[in-house]
């Protein structure tokens, strides 16, 4: 069990430095503002949870006062940008070996500034053992929380807030982890917690769960019996022994009982007829490895069988496994999965959780924070501050372990707005935002990782340039580079570290890392300039469009949308052009476009549709600032409005690359309204509504959208969804099935991707879809 | 070495039998004749079965004139011939070759007429004498005398049913004995079930010149248990249960009348465990099984304690204290875990205390044997209970040789089933624990439905 205080002597930060390879302030981050604490002390690992606030810079845009008549002066930006400090809430979880507990408590004591906190919620089998130590060191009262209650609260929390939290284990595939999309309704499910014994709990709602059974044959049996049989004391070593053993030397197999006849009888000869059946003899020696393996099979099979019996009795097919027997051990995930498949004949899936080790700490924390209603909010995993799955698994990555110590981190940001499904998704339970799973697709993974590595210099440069007045920008940008670089390296070796690896997750990780080092919006100035330029062109573009006949205009509008979409600083092919040719403009972009027929071309169908009755309400997800939104999207919006279609224009809540943000879109719309009566009246009459998506990603997850937007979409009866841009319509949502008509359009600004799709650079995707009746 | 123990003794006996046979001057049965009779038998057995009532009346006739062969030998001979056509030739065996133990049932006819006695070939006689006059065969074969079923009427013959077991690893010696005793000359059919019927089929043929009639294990098990229950146990009930199983003083083994056997959950605990749901005589299904069975208990005990026999393992277990080895709910929560309604005495983690070095050093072999027994038994109880719930069956019969002389396990099963089902499930046991497969095989031989 737990070994306490390895060093024991020192109680200052010095002793911590000796035992922890990372500087402690990189482990217990934001401790100065820490408010609530919870601790989960298990048999060998301690998990500490605390709530803290993070202060970071955000770029704000503010409209100038345009009452003056000189507003159209040439070099004036359309709005001003200011950088403000913003405070957001973050949950920190730190996992470390019990050995470090005393040193860690000392560190916390020394760095804890906030004194309002009086209580620490504690759970886990070791909570009582360290109670006095915690109370003495931290001067906090220890409130013990029920282990299972915490576990289930934690489980609900991660299932609701972390996409790709659950995964299945697939042996012989690379990687072995296959992540699941979160079901919109996580209940009911079965939680099989394999600690020293096994608890089987049926969870029906947030607050209702029931212990429906258990077994005394669990991790403690493996460990205890294993120690007796092999004289090997440590759990990990026992597992290691087991991974090298041959159970058939110890177990009586069906083929041992039936001889060779099992084949003709249709029996699988390798099935175990009797565990340890061959050891019923005094005249043979058995190897430690073989016995450990046999024991592992025996216990895993038994648990799997019982889990299936309980799942069947309660008609549940989602069974999550947790507890120290499972935690980060491919060996046990493999045997449990095998057993579940065998006993359920494939009807039940064994599911594992990425943050399984944190469930107790998360639950204990939530228990203590009930008055703050943490469940009201949506939370998001911060990729910059979280270690990722298997970060400290010696089996997978021995060097990794040496580098990061045995500390594992999870950080969850409280999102400003609750996120929900887009009500227009055809089947929310099967919706997968991402088009390509880079965890599966090794070739694509290799390409994109390299692509992001190569783009890193440019991003660093851009970040520094975005803060000319800052003295430490270069230093922070360098830190950003290192952080993101190391994330990319981790993902090269462990693509499963943060769930399914996708272009979206790579982009989001980069945004998280930029934020981490206070580069909230590296493109703010670029966007400002481009918006200014585009606004000036707007009247001319509108005049040209209005001069066209109806059918010509429709094509011109679509081409304008596509040409605008060329302006994407996220695409290297484009940013190279834009960097070298400042004069590159709307017309030049149109020239770049592929001629019809496009790579995916359902324009004729769309045109046909436009000849019919107008849509009631269109929901448009915009992409880039500048030409894209102003000269591409707005004219298109204007045409829809003229047809009598209401428009909801949804933009990102927070910045990502040069994507237009909600705040920017407000100013842009205001400026356009000043020039254009159609947009002006539509805004006033609320036929054109600007909304935020709740996202700060260059991609789009339709299962995590701002609740206000979702409500509005339902109220207005949106019957057309327009998704624009590579990030939102190709990397994500390319295959998204909606309940209404949809238009997905993008210009492929990446030659590798274009080739993959069977086209060339600047190929056009114009995908108009009508749901089946 | 195990194979030698039984084998040598039997071989000696086999030679003696051979010697006596040759001294009696009995001619060895000739091949062609034997083959003819084999054909006859086949025809007979493929014909429709005589109803049980018919053979019973024939039995009545026979009983009314003991030794009347002198009066009308030709008639008697005729009758015997006609009976022979319908009936299997002696000896009547049923064999169940499991992973660990071979179970053999032998029907000893007690109504042998003087004429039959005279006709009986010497080897057959010697088998009968050998099996019925001994209680142990070699050093590993044992006849469970206390299980003998007396005055049983089978296929119109009256006799005693004997129950014999020996370890599966002595199977080669058994086959060798069959060869030495010239079993093949008896033209008997060995009906065998269990995995070993397949595994040893070739050996029976090549070494013993014996053709095995292989029978499905579960068919035999179900058939055997239903039959044995129907004939009772020498006037007593075959089936029983425990009252107050947890209370050493008040615990009572009481007869149970299995008058409504269906549906029935049948849990057969041999080396491994098979669980069947039986809905009628001919309708049953295998629900599941587990590899944690008697073989696991004994195997682990051998590794943990160095014991060499099942009896020794059980004896050790009877003196041990499993709570030193297992982590109980109260060890974790100080008492009951009320949140989940778990009693403090329940085992939270089998062998859980053995994670600690100090505790490992403080336990005895007896404690370990006891904990192993409790672990395996509780687990079987738990799986059986879940199957009973899933199949909606409330009577559970536990059979198999794991339960032989294993009152600890039986009482634990009885208690666990009752406690966790809140009295909804009843654990039943049967006197002939491990022999049902072999009985089923015998019934198949006699084509008794």
Image (cartoon, coloured by chain):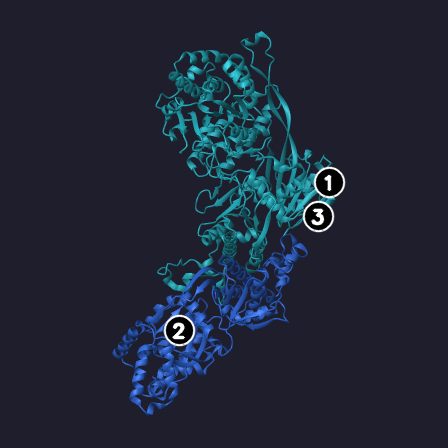
The answer to whether the residues at label 3 and label 2 have Cβ atoms under 8 Å apart is no
Residue B162: assigned label: none
Q: Label 3 belongs to which residue?
A: A131
Estimate the x, y position of residue A619 in percent, counting from the top left: 49, 26
Q: Chain of mark 3?
A: A
x and y percentages locating residue A676 in the rendered image? 51, 13
Q: What x and y, as percent, mark residue A346?
A: 44, 50
Marks 1 and 2 on same chain? no
Instruction: Identify the residue under disc 1.
Output: A118
Mark 1–mark 2 distance (CA, rounded to whole Å): 77 Å
Q: Earlier in the sequence, mark 1 or mark 3?
A: 1
Please tell me whether residue A32 is drawn above or below residue A189 in the rendered image. above
Q: Colour of chain A?
A: cyan
User: Horizontal placement of A385 versus B65: left or right?
Assistant: right
For this orientation, the residue located farthest to the top is A69
- For label 2, the residue is B442
Label 1, label 3: how many angstroms apart (C-alpha)? 14 Å
């Amino acid at each position: 069990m737990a070994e306490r205080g390895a060093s024991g002597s020192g109680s200052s930060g010095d002793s911590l430095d000796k035992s922890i390879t990372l500087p402690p302030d990189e482990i217990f981050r934001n401790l100065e503002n820490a408010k609530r604490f919870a601790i989960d002390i298990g048999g060998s690992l301690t998990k500490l949870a605390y709530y803290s606030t993070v202060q970071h810079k955000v770029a704000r845009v503010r409209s100038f006062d345009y009452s003056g008549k000189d507003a159209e002066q040439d070099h004036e930006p359309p709005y001003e940008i200011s950088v403000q400090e913003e405070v957001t809430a973050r949950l920190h979880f730190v996992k470390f070996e019990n050995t470090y507990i005393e040193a860690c408590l000392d560190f916390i004591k020394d760095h804890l500034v906030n004194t309002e906190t009086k209580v620490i919620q504690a759970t886990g089998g070791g909570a009582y053992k360290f109670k006095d130590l915690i109370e003495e060191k931290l001067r906090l009262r220890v409130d013990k929380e029920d282990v299972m209650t915490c576990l289930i609260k934690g489980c609900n929390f991660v299932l609701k807030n972390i996409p790709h939290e659950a995964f299945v284990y697939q042996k012989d595939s690379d990687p072995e982890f296959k992540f699941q999309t979160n079901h919109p309704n996580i209940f009911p499910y079965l939680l099989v917690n394999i600690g020293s014994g096994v608890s089987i709990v049926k969870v029906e709602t947030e607050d209702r769960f029931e212990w429906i059974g258990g077994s005394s044959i669990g991790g403690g049996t493996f460990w205890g019996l294993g120690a007796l049989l092999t004289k090997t004391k440590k759990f990990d070593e026992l597992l290691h022994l087991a991974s090298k053993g041959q159970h058939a030397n110890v177990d009586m197999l069906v083929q041992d009982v039936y001889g060779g006849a099992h084949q003709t009888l249709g029996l699988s000869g390798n099935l175990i007829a009797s565990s340890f059946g061959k050891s019923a003899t005094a005249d043979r020696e058995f190897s430690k490895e073989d016995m450990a393996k046999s024991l592992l099979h025996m216990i895993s099979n038994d648990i799997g069988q019982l889990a299936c019996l309980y799942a069947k009795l309660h008609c549940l097919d989602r069974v999550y496994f947790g507890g120290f027997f499972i935690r980060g051990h491919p060996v046990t995930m493999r045997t449990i999965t095998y057993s579940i498949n065998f006993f359920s004949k494939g009807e039940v899936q064994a599911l594992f959780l990425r943050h399984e080790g944190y469930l107790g700490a998360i639950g204990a924390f939530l228990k203590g924070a009930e008055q703050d209603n943490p469940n009201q909010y949506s939370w998001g995993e911060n990729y910059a501050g979280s270690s990722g799955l298997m970060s400290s698994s010696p089996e997978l990555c021995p060097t990794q372990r040496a580098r990061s110590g045995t500390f594992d981190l999870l950080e969850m940001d409280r999102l400003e707005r609750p996120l929900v499904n887009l009500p227009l998704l055809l089947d929310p339970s099967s919706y997968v935002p991402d088009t390509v799973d880079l965890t599966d697709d090794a070739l694509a993974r290799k390409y994109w990782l390299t692509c992001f590595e190569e783009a890193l210099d440019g991003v660093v440069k851009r970040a520094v340039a975005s803060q000319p007045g800052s003295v430490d920008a270069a230093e922070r940008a360098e830190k950003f580079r290192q952080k993101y670089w190391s994330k990319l390296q981790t993902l090269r070796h462990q693509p499963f570290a943060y769930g399914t690896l996708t272009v979206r997750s790579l982009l989001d990780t980069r945004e998280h890392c930029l934020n981490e080092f206070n580069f909230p919006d590296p493109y703010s100035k670029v966007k400002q300039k481009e918006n200014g330029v585009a606004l000036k062109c707007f009247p001319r573009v509108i005049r040209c469009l209005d001069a066209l006949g109806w059918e010509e205009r429709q094509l011109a509008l679509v081409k304008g949308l596509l040409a605008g979409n060329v302006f994407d600083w996220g695409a290297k092919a484009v940013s190279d052009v834009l960097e070298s040719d400042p004069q590159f403009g709307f017309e030049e972009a149109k020239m770049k476009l592929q001629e019809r027929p496009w790579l995916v071309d359902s324009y004729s169908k769309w045109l046909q549709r436009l000849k019919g009755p107008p849509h009631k309400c269109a929901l448009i997800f915009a992409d880039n600032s500048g030409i894209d939104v102003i000269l591409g999207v707005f004219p298109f919006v204007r045409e829809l409005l003229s047809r009598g279609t209401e428009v909801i224009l949804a933009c990102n809540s927070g910045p990502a690359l040069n994507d237009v943000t909600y705040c920017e879109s407000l100013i842009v719309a205001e400026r356009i309204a000043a020039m254009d009566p159609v947009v002006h009246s539509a805004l006033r009459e609320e036929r054109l509504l600007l909304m935020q998506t709740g996202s700060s990603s260059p991609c789009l997850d339709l299962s995590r959208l701002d609740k206000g937007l979702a409500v509005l979409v339902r109220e207005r009866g949106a019957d057309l969804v327009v998704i624009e841009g590579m990030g939102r319509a190709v990397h994500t949502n390319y295959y998204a099935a909606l309940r209404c008509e949809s238009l997905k359009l993008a210009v492929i600004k990446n030659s590798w991707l274009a080739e993959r799709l069977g086209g060339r650079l600047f190929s056009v995707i114009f995908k108009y879809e009508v749901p089946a009746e | 070495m195990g194979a030698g123990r039984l084998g040598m003794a039997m071989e000696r006996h086999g030679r003696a039998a051979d010697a006596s046979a040759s001294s009696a001057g009995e001619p060895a049965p000739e091949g062609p004749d034997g083959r003819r009779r084999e054909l006859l038998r086949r025809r007979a057995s493929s014909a429709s079965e005589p109803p049980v009532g018919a053979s019973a009346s024939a039995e009545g006739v026979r009983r009314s004139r003991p030794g009347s062969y002198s009066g009308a030998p030709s008639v008697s001979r005729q009758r015997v011939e006609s009976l022979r056509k319908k009936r299997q030739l002696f000896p009547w065996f049923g064999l169940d070759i499991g992973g660990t133990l071979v179970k053999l049932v032998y029907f000893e006819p007690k109504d042998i007429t003087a004429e039959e006695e005279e006709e009986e070939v010497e080897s057959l006689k010697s088998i009968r004498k050998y099996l019925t006059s001994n209680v142990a065969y070699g050093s590993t074969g044992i006849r469970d005398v206390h299980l003998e079923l007396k005055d049983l009427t089978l296929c119109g013959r009256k006799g005693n049913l004997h129950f014999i077991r020996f370890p599966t690893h002595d199977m080669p010696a058994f086959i060798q004995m069959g060869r030495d005793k010239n079993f093949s000359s008896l033209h008997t059919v060995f009906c065998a079930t269990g995995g070993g019927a397949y595994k040893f089929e070739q050996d029976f043929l090549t070494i013993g010149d014996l053709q095995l009639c292989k029978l499905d294990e579960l068919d035999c098990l179900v058939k055997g248990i239903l039959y044995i229950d129907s004939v009772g146990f020498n006037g007593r009930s075959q089936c029983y249960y425990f009252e107050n199983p947890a209370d050493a003083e008040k615990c009572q083994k009481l007869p149970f009348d299995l008058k409504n056997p269906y549906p029935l959950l049948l849990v057969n605990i041999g080396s491994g465990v098979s669980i069947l749901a039986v809905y009628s005589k001919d309708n049953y299904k295998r629900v599941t099984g587990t590899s944690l069975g008697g073989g696991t208990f004994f195997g682990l005990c051998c590794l943990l304690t160095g014991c060499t026999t099942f009896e020794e393992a059980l004896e050790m277990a009877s003196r041990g204290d499993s709570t030193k080895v297992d982590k109980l709910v109260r060890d974790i929560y100080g008492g009951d875990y009320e949140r989940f309604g778990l009693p403090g005495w329940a085992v939270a983690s089998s062998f859980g205390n053995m994670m600690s070095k100090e505790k490992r050093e403080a336990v005895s072999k007896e404690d370990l044997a006891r904990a192993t027994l409790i672990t395996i038994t509780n687990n079987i109880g738990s799986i059986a209970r879940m199957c009973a719930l899933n199949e909606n069956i409330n009577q559970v019969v536990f059979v198999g040789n794991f339960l032989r002389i294993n009152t600890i396990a039986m009482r634990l099963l009885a208690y666990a089933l009752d406690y966790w089902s809140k009295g909804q499930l009843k654990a039943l046991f049967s006197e002939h624990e491990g022999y049902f497969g072999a009985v089923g095989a015998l019934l198949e031989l006699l084509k008794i439905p």
